[in-house]
Amino acid sequence: MFDDAIKKYYEIKSKRLIDALRSKGWSAYFFDNKDEARRNVLRILSETGYRKIGVPGSVTIRQIGLIEELEKRGFKVIQH
């Protein structure tokens, strides 16, 4: 029950942040889990046509295995 409350808290906070970013013209998304996030980020990036991706110091991107998946799909990944 406590885990559900924490998840709901972060979902609400995330959606507020997404609304704020979108009001400034940014694209922003919320995903329920790492598999959904990885799948959708890969889809979004593939649709852009870009083949070179810069990755900041994001721990999350590394935790969900996105860098390895991008490289497997032929993206050139530039890390800090």
Image (cartoon, rainbow, N blue to C red):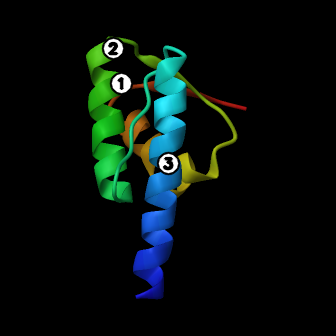
What crowding class fits label 3: few (fewer than 14 Cα within 10 Å), some (14-19), or many (20 or more)? some
Mark 1 lies on a secondary structure that is helix
Q: Which residue is mark 1?
A: 45
| Mark closest to the chain's N terminus, 1 or 3 | 3
> Residue 77: where, in percent of width, then height?
53, 28
Q: As displayed, is residue 13 above or below residue 74? A: below
Mark 2 lies on a secondary structure that is helix
Numbered badge on residue 48: 2
User: If the image is split into quadrants, where does the C terminus sit?
Assistant: top right
Q: Nearer the viewer, residue 71 or 15?
A: 15
Numbered badge on residue 14: 3
Q: CA distance from mark 2 to mark 1?
A: 5 Å
Question: At x 39% / y 37%, what residue is drawn?
Answer: 29
Q: Are marks 1 and 3 in contact (CB under 8 Å)?
A: no
Q: CA distance from mark 1 to mark 3?
A: 21 Å
Q: Amino acid at mark 1?
A: Leu
Question: At x 29% / y 23%, what residue is drawn?
Answer: 46
Q: Are marks 2 and 1 in contact (CB under 8 Å)?
A: yes
Q: As displayed, is residue 18 above or below residue 33? A: above
What crowding class fits label 1: few (fewer than 14 Cα within 10 Å), some (14-19), or many (20 or more)? some
> Residue 43: where, in percent of width, then height?
26, 31
Question: At x 31% / y 56%, what residue is drawn?
Answer: 35
Depth-wise, is mark 1 or mark 3 nearer the camera? 3
> Residue 28: where, in percent of width, then height?
44, 31
> Residue 51: where, in percent of width, then height?
41, 16
Question: Relative to residue 21, is residue 56 drawn left or right?
Answer: right
Numbered badge on residue 32: none
Q: Amino acid at mark 3?
A: Ser
Residue 75, picture quadrant? top left
What crowding class fits label 2: few (fewer than 14 Cα within 10 Å), some (14-19), or many (20 or more)? few
Q: How many marks?
A: 3
